[in-house]
Image (tube, rainbow, N blue to C red):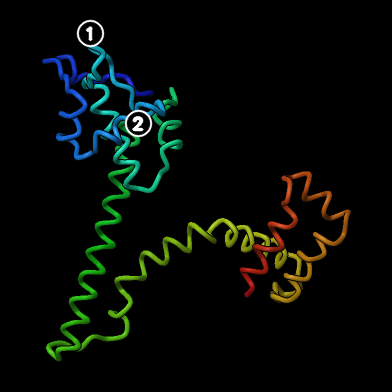
Amino acid sequence: MSGSPCTAHEAGDPVRYSVHELAKLSGVSVRTLHHYDAIGLLCPKRAENNYRVYEACEVDRLQQILLYREVGLGLADIKALLDDQAFDVERALEDHLARLVEQRERTDALIASVEKTLASKKGTITMNDTEKFEGFKKKLVEENERTYGKEARAADLHRQWLTAFWKDGQYSAETHKGITEMYVADERFKRYYEAIAPGAAEFLRDAVAAYCS
């Protein structure tokens, strides 16, 4: 299921909504639906009287638009995504469901943390230090992985490669940082890493600096 054609369930009774009916059904304002039409994001068909008519395809597409709005995508990005012939509706819904489940788990953990904190303040339970951070830890670990995971893995692989040649495998963070600084400062080393990927020398230096800090 790629692109945004009508899906199989639409082969039954025809679905037709006016702009006001779809607005009432979805909670999206008529003005917003007009805007989506104007920018080519959600283009209804036209009845003989030239009124907008939304059929099953458009209803499904509006749902997809709203799902992606919920995760913070801009309208231009949503349009590009939905118009892509390689767009897989089922895969997109599976990914979105996985994100919502993760979000629910984080919310449940935060609710539990607030409830425990409140009970602790009232003196009905004793909350240990580990429990104080349970609601935040998973989210922070995930954010750290998204932000620094690639750099951390690159720095650690470089560390492993270096220590294979160092005496007794001894590791020095300062020496590690110094070597990667040399990769940027010395044109011979820089050309070698730039041949692998543009900016590779600077990326490795910055990754190691963050790894060693």
Residue 95 to residue 148: above or below = above
Quarter of the image for residue 4 reads top left
Quarter of the image for residue 78 reads top left
Q: Quadrant of the N terminus?
A: top left
Q: Earlier in the sequence, mark 1 or mark 2?
A: 2
Q: Quadrant of the C terminus?
A: bottom right
Q: Nearer the viewer, mark 1 or mark 2?
A: 1
- Looking at the image, the residue that sits furthest to the bottom is 123
Tell whether 108 sits left or right of 72: left
Count neighbours of disc 1 (C-alpha within 10 A) and say few if under 14, some if 14 to 19, many if 20 or more: few
Q: Amino acid at mark 2?
A: Tyr
Secondary structure category for the residue under label 1: loop
Which percent across, then down, holds residue 204? 69, 59
- What is the CA distance from the residue labelled 1 to the residue labelled 2? 21 Å
Q: Amino acid at mark 1?
A: Glu
Q: Give the number of the disc on residue 186.
A: none
Tell whether 141 sits left or right of 107: right
Residue 91 to residue 44: above or below = below
Which percent across, then down, holds residue 60? 25, 28
Q: Mark 1 touching mark 2, by CB under 8 A?
A: no
Secondary structure category for the residue under label 2: helix
In this rendered view, identify the residue nearer to me: 115 or 155.
Answer: 115
Count neighbours of disc 2 (C-alpha within 10 A) and say few if under 14, some if 14 to 19, many if 20 or more: some
Which percent across, then down, holds residue 175? 76, 74
In this rendered view, identify the residue nearer to me: 4 or 187.
Answer: 4
Residue drawn at point x = 32 percent, y = 19 percent? 5
Q: How many marks?
A: 2
In this rendered view, identify the residue nearer to me: 78 or 156.
Answer: 78
Residue position marked by numbered label 2 in the rendering: 36
Residue drawn at point x = 24 percent, y = 33 percent? 30
Which percent across, then down, holds residue 58? 27, 24
Residue position marked by numbered label 1 in the rendering: 48
